[in-house]
Amino acid sequence: MAPGLRRAFALGNIVPQFAAQNDALSRAICAFDHGWPSHVDAVMPDGWLLGARADGGVRLRVKDYARFSRVLRVELPAADDVAAKFHAFLTAQLGKPYDFESIAAFAVGRNWQKPDSWFCSELVAAALQAAGWFAHPLATATNRITPSDLLLVLSAFVAIGTGQ
């Protein structure tokens, strides 16, 4: 466990954190995505956030690493083994680069499941799929999974609050 951080959630929980910042890049992602979140991290059992960002790829970050203007944590119920698989998948992705092609995928085709680099919401969606959290694999007909796409998919399974 990271110094100064207490266990925020039980292992049996999976918690994606949707967020937006008040900057030009975040606003551009929201505009192309037609929704409010511009980023998604996974809250790890020790409270750290694991996600993919342009400023370092897939890394662990402290909970207040950015000045988010809006945050929404979605608690997904999961059996302990499913949550363990989710967190193990994410941990195995540490150090992989950010998928800059994914930004272009807002306009052109690309396989969102390509495992050599990640965009934030695609990383979390792939971890949910690898853990078996979804009853069926997500459709592969789509070329991307944006933050708003992932939030919409999850809203079919759990009640979603409005965030801050």
Image (cartoon, helix red, strand yellow):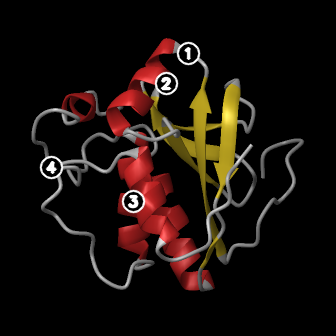
Mark toward the start of the polypeptide (2 vs 4):
2
Give the residue at x 46% y 44%. Answer: 94
Find disc 4 in the rendering and name its residue: 111
Q: Residues within 10 Å of mark 2 (few under 14, many from 20)?
A: some
Q: Which residue is mark 1?
A: 23
* Circle 2/circle 1 CB separation < 8 Å: yes
Mark 4: amino acid = Asn
Specify the amino acid type for callout 1: Asp
Query: Which element carries disc 4, helix, strand or loop?
Result: loop
Residue 3 lies, in percent from the top left, at 85, 42
Work out whether mark 3 precedes mark 1 in sequence or the reverse, and give the earlier one.
Answer: 1
CB atoms at circles 3 and 1 under 8 Å apart? no
Residue 104: quarter of image? top left
Residue at left 52%, top 39%? 36
79 versus 29 height, above or below: below
Q: Tell me, yes or no, whether the two marked residues, 1 and 4, touch with CB atoms within 8 Å.
A: no
Query: How far across and down, in percent of the image, does residue 100 sit?
Result: 27, 27
Which one is in front, 72 or 85? 72
Marking on residue 26: 2
Residue 125 tag number = 3
- The structure residue drawn at horizontal position 69% and vertical position 29%, both measured from the top left corner, is 69
**Quick check: marks 2 and 4 in contact, CB under 8 Å?**
no
Question: In which quadrant will I find the C terminus?
Answer: top right
Of labels 2 and 3, earlier in sequence is 2
**Rendered image quadrant of residue 68:** top right
